[in-house]
Image (spheres, rainbow, N blue to C red):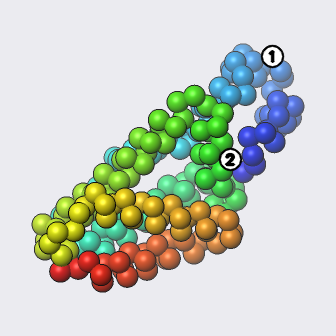
Amino acid sequence: MTVGYNEVTLSRLLKETGLSKGGFYHHFESKEELFEQVIDMFFFDHASDAGFQPSTDSTFIENMNNFLSQKEQAFRLFASQLGVEHSEINFFMFIMQAIQHLPGARQKVDLFMYREKQQIEKIIDIAIQRKEIKPGVEKSQLANHLVSMFDGVEMHGVLLSQSFETLSREKEMVRQLYEWIKH
């Protein structure tokens, strides 16, 4: 998760794990199978909608801040499980390489994005019910904009090695957006 897929050779895997070649092949048929298990364990298995549920007692801003904080906690958990700093993991590279090398990864990414959008739509629904947002705001379009905004900010954070500032930037952008859409 800290280097590119092509940089992880079988000899590097054997050296870093202490496994023999036979030991490796006893557990995995190929490097691709290992990669698929790694991406499932460290990303897709944790990428369900069970981790965050918006509260009907919370405002739009509170729910969005909690949603973003939960995402940040998940990234930090992945990093701590690997014994590296959060900023050392390029999640976008990791996901793009999974799509490139693993059949079925694109569908898993699509499902992850769909679930993230559903969570945001629930937050928007609550805000609409609480009459916090102007009438006529299309929740699906707003959720799409928010997901795209988060992806862009997070990618810039990775590219500019400013991943720790990402959460505060996203929260500020949500606050500014709310000023435009609030009732």
Residue at label 1? Answer: 22
Tell me which residue sits at (37%, 70%) in the image: 65
Describe residue 8's horizontal placement relative to residue 125 as left or right.
right
| 167 in relation to 139, above or below | below
Q: Which percent across, then down, holds residue 86?
A: 63, 61
Instruction: Identify the mark at residue 170; answer none if there is no mark.
Output: none
Identify the amino acid type marked 1.
Answer: Gly
Q: Secondary structure at mark 1?
A: helix
Tell me which residue sits at (50%, 55%) in the image: 74
Tell me which residue sits at (64%, 64%) in the image: 158
Work out whether residue 137 or residue 114 is closer to the camera in this orientation and state it: 137
Tell me which residue sits at (74%, 40%) in the image: 5
Identify the amino acid type marked 2.
Answer: Met
Can the viewer see residue 70 in this picture? Answer: no
Can the viewer see residue 178 in this picture? Answer: yes
Describe residue 9's horizontal placement relative to residue 106 as left or right.
right
Describe residue 55's horizontal placement relative to residue 95 as left or right.
left
| 43 in relation to 126, above or below | above
Residue at label 2? Answer: 1
Work out whether residue 81 or residue 180 is closer to the camera in this orientation and state it: 180
Quadrant containing the C terminus is bottom left
Q: Residues within 10 Å of mark 2 (few under 14, many from 20)?
A: many
Figure label count:
2
| 39 in relation to 131, above or below | above
Q: Quadrant of residue 97?
A: top right
Q: Secondary structure at mark 2?
A: loop
Work out whether residue 71 or residue 85 is closer to the camera in this orientation and state it: 71
